[in-house]
Image (cartoon, grey):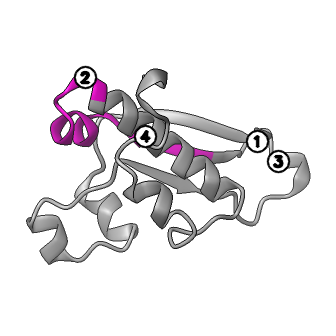
């Protein structure tokens, strides 16, 4: 992937969730993100290496929602692929079927 950085952070802050479009009610109810794609915006070609697209994977929400190690591995893979798909222009709607599949990789791949 050209000009993409994948980072892992512990959890999104409430401020981050607000900026991502979550309402105060959603935040109070505990809704969160597993990952987030931050596209490169308004950066000249010469600056792309210094300011790449960024994918953030949030560790604690994944671990909290998927305590089973096998399920956690599957969900981490799904989250990374989901966010990389955003890098290539796919929307959340485009990814609905993929996201709805509890194991799109098959058991032998985990």
C-alpha span from label 1 to label 2: 31 Å
Vertical order, 87 against 59 (above or below): below
Number of marks in picture:
4
Residue 110 lies, in percent from the top left, at 42, 22
Q: Secondary structure at mark 2?
A: helix
In this view, the residue in front, 83 or 56, is: 83
Image height of 89 relative to 58, above or below: below
Q: Which residue is mark 3?
A: 47
**Where is residue 34 shown, x and y percent of the image?**
35, 47
For disc 1, the marked residue is: 3
Region in magenta: 54-70
Residue linked to disc 4: 57
| Nearer to me, 47 or 95 | 95
Q: Is residue 59 magenta?
A: yes
Where disc 3 sits, the SS reads: helix
In space, the residues marked 2 and 4 are separated at their CA atoms by 17 Å
User: Nearer the N terminus, badge 3 or badge 4?
Assistant: 3
Structural distance between the alpha carbons of marks 4 and 1 = 17 Å
Label 2: which residue?
69
Quadrant, the N terminus: top right
* Callout 4 secondary element: strand
Residue 28 lies left or right of residue 84; in this view the side is left
Residue located at (75% from left, 40% from top): 50
Q: Residues within 10 Å of mark 1 (few under 14, many from 20)?
A: few
Of the numbered discs 2 and 3, the one sitting upstream in the chain is 3
Say if the magenta span includes residue 40: no
């Amino acid at each position: 992937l050209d000009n993409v950085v994948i980072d892992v952070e512990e959890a999104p802050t409430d401020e981050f969730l607000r900026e991502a479009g979550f309402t105060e009610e959603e935040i109070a109810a505990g809704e969160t993100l597993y990952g987030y794609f931050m596209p490169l915006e308004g950066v000249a070609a010469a600056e792309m290496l210094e300011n790449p697209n960024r994918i953030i994977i949030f560790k604690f929400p994944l671990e909290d929602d998927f305590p089973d190690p096998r399920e956690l591995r599957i969900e981490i893979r799904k989250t990374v692929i989901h966010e990389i798909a955003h890098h290539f222009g796919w929307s959340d709607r485009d990814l609905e079927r993929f996201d709805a599949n509890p194991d799109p990789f098959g058991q032998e791949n985990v």
